[in-house]
Amino acid sequence: MIVSIALPSSRAHAVLARCALALAAIMAWSAPTHAADAPQTATLDGILDQAAALVPLETVIVARDGQIIAERGYRGHRTTAATNIKSASKLVISALVGIAIEKGVLEGTDQRVASLLAPELPANPDPRLQRLTVGNLLSMQAGLGSTSGQNYGAWVGSRNWVRAALARPFDDEPGGRMIYSTGSTHLLSAILTRQSGRSTLQLARDWLGPQDGFQIAS
């Protein structure tokens, strides 16, 4: 069974526990101990009614054995509408990097970032940039200071996101501790577009779709 929920990331942490309880209720409902479909449906409808109390919640989709058995939109949101998946887009980029390696667009996870993004390296670059690999970016172990959290505004306000991400001071060695940073994912996106000559949107639509009921919006 698959349960999908959508809610704005800016408020996600505040309701995560309540959403987990709601999902636990749905999963308990879905257990194969129920014999009749009608009582199950009534129970699930009740759970989805209660989920409306989770104010940030936008949509819920419940699928079992590949079939959608329930879906609900809240406060004007629709399960068929496009939405910004925010940090979940990192999973999409990781999948695209894997496909790019399989197709020969990239050599592998040990490929050095400096050679792939040479024109965007900062003046007098830190020597550690020469050790930075595609795999380090994928695992959030670039060592570069994060562009997320309190640093996000300044980063997105910069004129060149790639150069600004590469110019961040090192907080650890490449391959060291995990440092969550949207900049690392953006660097992967830049690498994909430079090596393929196509936008990340074009690659995603070509390599991940089309699938029935699935669309990557612009």
Image: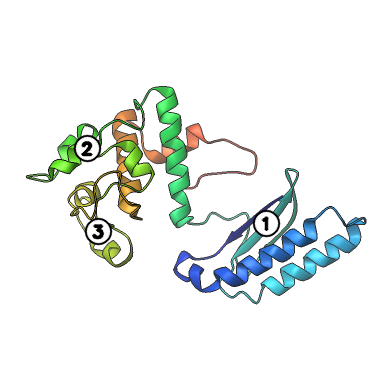
Residue underneath mark 1: 61
| Residue assigned mark 2 | 131
The location of residue 218, given as percent across then percent down, is 45, 47
Whole-angstrom CA distance, mark 1 to mark 3, is 34 Å
In the image, 90: left or right of 212?
Answer: left
Residue farthest to the right, as pictured: 36
Q: Which residue is mark 3?
A: 155
Q: Nearer the viewer, residue 95 or 17?
A: 17
Q: Position of residue 68 (x, y in %)?
A: 73, 50
Foreground disc of the pair 1, 2: 2
Mark pair 3, 2: CA separation: 23 Å
Question: Which amino acid type is marked by label 3?
Answer: Trp
- State how far apart marks 1 and 2 are (Cα): 43 Å
The secondary structure type at the circle numbered 1 is strand
SS of the residue at dot 3?
helix
Q: Depth check: 28 or 151 in front?
A: 28
Q: Vertically, is 33 above or below 191?
A: below
Of the image marks 1 and 3, the number of the one nearer the N terminus: 1
The answer to whether residue 22 shows anywhere in this view is yes
